[in-house]
Amino acid sequence: MPQLRLDTPVQFLSGIGPKRGEALERLGVVTAQDLLLHLPHRYLDASSVTPLAKARVGDDVACVGTVTAKGILPTRKGLRIFHAVLKDDSGVLECAWPGQPFLDRSISEGQVLLVVGPIRFYHGRQMAPRETIVLSDVDDLAVGGVVLPVYPATEGLSHKQIRAIIAKHLDALIPLVPDILPERLRERFALPALGDAVRAVHRPTSIKDAEAGRRRLAVDELLDLQLMLSRARYIARQGQRGTEFVVHRTLTTALRESLPWELTADQKQAIREIFDDMTKPERMHRLLMGDVGTGKTVVALCAMLLALENGYQAALMAPTELLAEQHMRSLTALLAPLGIVPELLVGKLTVADKRAARARLVSGETRIVVGTHALVQEGVAFDRLGLVVIDEQHRFGVEQRAALMGKGEAPDVLLLTATPIPRSLALTRYGDLDVSVLKLKPPGRGTIRTAVRTGGHRERVFDFVHQTALQGGQVYIVLPVIEESERADLRAAETMAKTLTAQWPDVSVGLVHGRLKAPERDAVMRGFRDGSIKVLVATTVIEVGIDVPNATVMVIEHPERFGLAQLHQLRGRVGRGEAESHCILLPNSDDVPERLRAFSQTDDGFKIAELDLEERRQGDLLGARQSGGVDFKIARFPDDTDLLGEARALAQAILADDPTLVKKANKPLRERAVTRYPRGEVLFRVG
């Protein structure tokens, strides 16, 4: 038999084989090392199991019982529900699995089930399990405090089979794992040795023991990531000398004196940080992160004017033509007292207009240009590009961002985002950037009152919407789906638009959603912006949208279907003028989730981001909506915030002494980081 190694394909381990190997591969388990790092996603112990008779309505519990009866019940809408009655020494409990009739084939009378979920009242006391585990017998669950790990599973391979596979190979694999974590970090956090940590997460004696092991593995994961990000940041700043701008205080001072309001303390601090970067010989690579309405545009304009003071040009790239046009209007108004006229370069311009705009850019006549991806097209050249500003940068591909930066010799780069992210996550998602944060809002912004209204108030809410539109105001109505479906009892955008158009012939109603072609969608949005459309029915395509100061009401149907951060982005579409605005949440039930009540009580985007993160935990930590980040397998936030900060500081200290990790003591760190994050191989070859 070949010698066992960490890189041994998992299918060659005893008791696995090709078929199980394919199933494990769907879980990301390809090698023996992957198997060791396939961690339980939760644990169950005897003390956490609730007797069936003591499971109360409203509780979220774990119960164990023997199946005494089962069957499939159809509903009038055609939904098939699997039912089972469980019994233990204390009593019985009915369980229901809507839409899962296939369980009838795998669950039999006489089996012992462990079920986890909320207890509700529906024709009696009933559980709707979100997790179901078939136990071979009652002894399989722990007795006397022994902890049962529950693993992520897949079709063809149950959590129980995975537990048996890992248990079989654990003792042979643990000695093969080298412990390369610096001793000083282990001592600082009182972390166990790596082998002890791996054993603790798979074979814990207590929940506390398992958590200590997980945190040790999380440190390894976070350190590897921070090594990669710190290296990327080092290359970005050191790899190519930037422009050493000089603060002349001519245009920048003139702008400040022309503003009808005072800059906030946050804006002043961000400007200082940006100017400090721009006056250094290294290229600036900074993110300006600010909630809706905190004044990112003015801060970015100060940076652009510093470039202009030094004889350079500045470019601002936005992801959509509507957003580019919005920036163009804002900059035109702000720059008018300075006698500077910005240029707009977007795809919809005529061929002649594009040609003329490109000629002004290459000659240097145009000093500030605002555009979309049209800025990076072939044929667009600059006379002397010194600063690149990219708005909502996560919506551009890496190639598009690099192409714009490549239009100059080594322009400084300022990235903007309106998505509030807790500082802990900013270190992770933007670990290769310097970060400035805006929280305070300038004066002149109207307040937004947020309210949760249940079914009994629905008619009054829409009467309020109708009256607002009749009086010249504008309203957004947001729904989670485009069209109705038999599988989901959700109000849909298309149906809502048709209904309101029929009910309110005296009000213009528009509809916008993701299936519309871009020109058609933009036409509707322009109609709303210009005021010809009073009520805009939409899906979340308006989450990052245009500035309509006259829009003062936002109604969100089924808010329970959205994350808190997404609700906050939607709410940010109103409150953009001086008038008081309203955000009204219409949940599908009179039982309002606590998360919605918490959302309605704060308008601090960073606080909401913290609540959203705590609610989601590590599940969809940085998913499609926040693309470009890392979906951690081990680390959890906000629990591991302390580990993240320390891992970043340690990574920076290591790289300051050994930027490419070629020293003997650091080579294992390099190899592990490259294995975990393939991009690291390229990063560590540079320089």
Image (cartoon, rainbow, N blue to C red):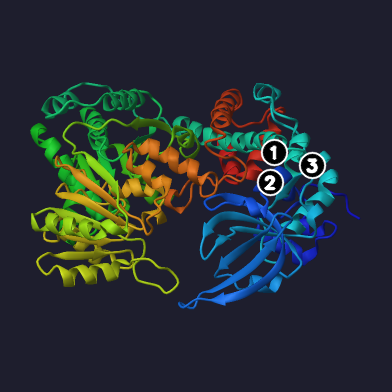
> Residue sitting at 12 percent across and 57 percent down?
467
Specify which label sits upstream in the sequence, 2 or 1. 2
**Residue holding disc 2:** 43
Residue 207 circle label: 1
The relative height of residue 432 versus residue 543 in the rendered view (above or below) is above
Is residue 365 visible from the viewing direction of this image? no
Query: In the figure, residue 587 lies in which quadrant?
Result: bottom left
Location of residue 662 in the rendering, given as x and y in whole percent from the top left corner: 66, 31
Q: Is 203 in front, or is 85?
A: 85
Q: Secondary structure at mark 3?
A: loop
Location of residue 130 in the rendering, given as x and y in whole percent from the top left corner: 58, 58
Whether residue 339 sits left or right of residue 215 in the image: it is left
Looking at the rendered structure, the kind of residue marked 1 is: Ile
- Foreground mark, 1 or 3? 3
CA gap, disc 2 to disc 1?
7 Å
Tally of numbered discs = 3
Looking at the rendered structure, the kind of residue marked 2 is: Tyr
Specify which label sits upstream in the sequence, 3 or 2. 2
Q: Badge 2: few (under 14), some or many (20 or more) residues near its Cα, within 10 Å?
A: some
Specify which label sits upstream in the sequence, 1 or 3. 3
Where is the N terminus found, in terms of image quarters?
bottom right
CA gap, disc 1 to disc 3?
13 Å
CA gap, disc 3 to disc 2?
15 Å
Whether residue 232 sits left or right of residue 670 in the image: it is left
Q: Badge 3: few (under 14), some or many (20 or more) residues near its Cα, within 10 Å?
A: few
> Residue sitting at 61 percent across and 50 percent down?
61
> Residue sitting at 28 percent across and 41 percent down?
292
The answer to whether mark 2 and mark 1 are in CB contact below 8 A is: yes
Residue 144 circle label: 3
